[in-house]
Amino acid sequence: MTRHLPFPKDLLSSLADYLVPLLLIGFSLTMAIRSSGFFELDELTHFMKSRECWTDWHCLLDVWGRPLCTGLYALTAPFGLPASRILAVFVAVVTGIGTAQLGKVSLQLLPAQARYHRSLLWLLLFAQPLYMLQSFAVMTEMLLAASWVWAIVALANRRLLPAGLLVGLGGLARPEGWLAIIGWPVMLWLSGRRDEASCASAGVFPWKFLSPCTSMLLAVIPTLLWWVVGWLTYGSAVWLLTDWPWPFRSPYGKTPGQFALALLIALALWMVLPVATGMRLLWSRFRHGDSDARSATFFILAPLLGLVTLHGFLALFGLFGSLSLPRYFVMVAPFVAVLSSLGIQGYQGPDAIGSLRRPWFTDGRGKRAGWFWVMIGMLAVLPMVLLVAAGQLPVAENIQFRRLDEAIRWVRENQEAVYSSQTASGELARSLPFDPNPANVVAAHPYIYYRLGVPLSCLGHRMAFSAASMRAAPVGTVAIVENVIWEYDGFARRDQLMTWGYELVKRSRGVGTAKRAHWSLSILQPLGGRHLLSLVGDAAQVEVWVKRR
């Protein structure tokens, strides 16, 4: 008889299955409402593109912004950033429910495995720091996670048509979604073999051809429609290639070390052990189990290993602008949670193998100690507790935003004339012509246009990406240069600006008197590079340049 691992009390377990998700959702809602800053600048860009949809529908075709993200958040963008973040919480809740369903289905296909605990799966989702941070952020990764987890749930329940459509929608959420579309026939074939085995034993004729083909067609249709609409709009059949925003050779170079670090951060370090144990348990079931057990193994491991392999390859060879960021693993957070759940609860079957025969932290009767579950709960909430204690949650405007606000305020106050230097007595030496139109301000940082109230499609933002346009810009053009995006992403250098006739008129740098990020986060900067400046609120430098000739 199979022995299960209970929580300390069945009543406590039942209450936790409802109370834990509600508490975690409440935390995300609180952060969505109270946060004024951005942990990722991409969130601000996605929000602005969604808001601009109402005046320029072409934003829905944007390759970088992705149609699913831009279109969904366009529903709430007119009501402000908090409304869009509340919608993001809803997406995270949908992903969490899908993870719980995936856990239930997987355990049904894996006989003699650990018990199903909804509360544990929710905890293991939010234990992943980047999932927790993106549970209230306007980003693309969570949308792909929701699409993938529900596609696998539908596939496990033999609902091939909705599964195919969900995989297809994932292609509109992120480029990695196309990887699932390419691999979808393999997943359908594996599911078909499982059906053949189960139907043969029951004497029933399984589906053979129509449903899998329709599912594959549904997986392709969303991207196909996107491409056709773009073709009709731009008049080019190769518009997806010409508008592709990431060069083949990444300007950030090869990042295998950052990729390994990102994986550890995504797993909050401690989850490496239960994930590895869960993978070993699944492998043992794959080798010694039936077709259901093999299918469950593929359902859980295929998305996870596929994404890790893809981004590992991009990082190793420095391709397509991959930054090897921890947030990439949000896309497979549901599968990490299910895998960790199996690893934490241990192996329960009578056919346990080797060192997996006895689960972790049990007494002589094979029962978990109550303190074990307390420890898991504490580890799960540790990232959010540390971030709140460090002053990083709710997300506030960090140093770079305050420096940018100073530059924007200075530009607005000097719309008639800009002064390039001062005499020894402090008198203004000379004045320069100045373009007062905020849409013509040249900048790379999206926050500048967010504060100026102009769309990212404005002339100034387009000029920042063209050296020829900046060189030919009229006298009086204002450029705001910072050391977060402008320098990091390789825009015009300072010596080029001087050669083109721009003059530095204002510079602000340092942390000032504002509260800095907690030291425990700042020490990660040498490991994460300058990109982490936008995450930990460290020192920033902002300069205002004006073209004088």
Image (cartoon, rainbow, N blue to C red):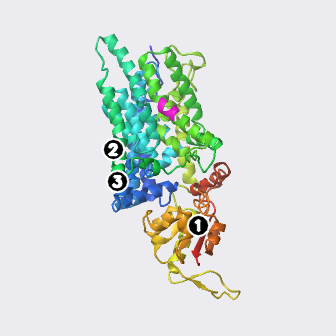
Foreground label between 3 and 2:
3
Identity of the residue drawn at 36% across and 56% down:
58
Give the magenta-colored segment's residue range. Answer: 302-306
Q: Amino acid at mark 3?
A: Thr
Asked whether the residues under the numbered discs 3 and 1 touch, taking CB atoms below 8 Å apart as contact, a structural biologist would say no
Q: Earlier in the sequence, mark 3 or mark 1?
A: 3
Q: Earlier in the sequence, mark 3 or mark 2?
A: 2
Local secondary structure at mark 1: strand
Locate residue 455: give its quadrant. Answer: bottom left
Numbered badge on residue 233 = 3
Q: Position of residue 541 (x, y in %)?
A: 63, 66
Q: Amino acid at mark 1?
A: Val
Numbered badge on residue 225 = 2
Q: Is residue 171 above or below residue 41?
A: above
Q: Amino acid at mark 2?
A: Leu
Numbered badge on residue 239 = none
Locate residue 211: give its quadrant. Answer: top left
Q: Residues within 10 Å of mark 1 (few under 14, many from 20)?
A: many
Residue 126 in view here: no
Locate residue 201: give its quadrant. Answer: top left
Q: Which residue is mark 1?
A: 481
